[in-house]
Image (cartoon, rainbow, N blue to C red):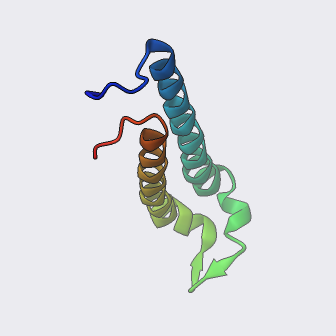
């Protein structure tokens, strides 16, 4: 934000709103995977076995963590893209 590009308050408000929308969507996905697949739908998912493990059990023990790590990388990718769009990226 040190250069003389458009860093007006309106532009930064728009940037922040988009950032919050990304966070909201990613956290909803994580909630659905961790709480939904690991707890709410675990019994239904346990009917499916992958590698000898029940799918509901797998989501509760490991799947939600894997999804969380993937979501972190997705967030980094989205934020780098957003930073370039609003010209606030580190060059």
Q: Quadrant of residue 37?
A: bottom right
Q: Is residue 33 above or below residue 5?
A: below
Task: Give the total number of marks visible in the rendering.
Answer: 0
Q: Which residue, as the protein is rendered here, is positioned at the far front?
A: 4
Q: Which residue, as the protein is rendered here, is positioned at the far top?
A: 9
Which of the two residues, 30 or 34, is positioned nearer the viewer here?
30
Which of the two residues, 46 or 1, is positioned nearer the viewer here?
1
- Say which residue appears at 53% left-offset and 41% top-offset: 27
Which of the two residues, 5 or 28, is positioned nearer the viewer here?
5
Q: From the top left corner, tell me how far across and down residue 16 is, in percent.
A: 47, 25
- Say which residue appears at 57% left-offset and 85% top-offset: 52
Q: Quadrant of residue 59?
A: bottom right
Q: From the top left corner, tell me how far across and down residue 60 is, in percent.
A: 52, 59
Q: Is residue 13 left or right of residue 43?
A: left
Q: From the top left corner, tell me how far across and down residue 28 is, in percent.
A: 59, 41
- Say which residue appears at 60% left-offset and 47% top-offset: 29
Q: Is residue 12 above or below residue 83?
A: above
Q: From the top left corner, tell me how far across and down residue 1 is, in percent.
A: 30, 28
- Say which residue appears at 41% left-offset and 47% top-offset: 80
Q: Is residue 8 above or below residue 39?
A: above
Which of the two residues, 25 or 91, is positioned nearer the viewer here?
91
Q: Quadrant of residue 9?
A: top left
Q: Is residue 47 left or right of residue 64?
A: right
């Amino acid at each position: 934000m040190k250069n003389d590009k458009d860093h007006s308050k309106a532009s930064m408000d728009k940037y922040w709103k988009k950032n919050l929308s990304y966070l909201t969507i990613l956290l909803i996905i994580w909630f659905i995977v961790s709480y939904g697949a690991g707890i709410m739908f675990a019994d239904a998912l346990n009917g499916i076995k992958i590698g000898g493990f029940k799918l509901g059990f797998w989501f509760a023990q490991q799947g939600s963590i894997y999804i969380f790590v993937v979501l972190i990388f997705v967030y980094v990718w989205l934020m780098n893209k957003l930073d370039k769009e609003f010209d606030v990226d580190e060059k």
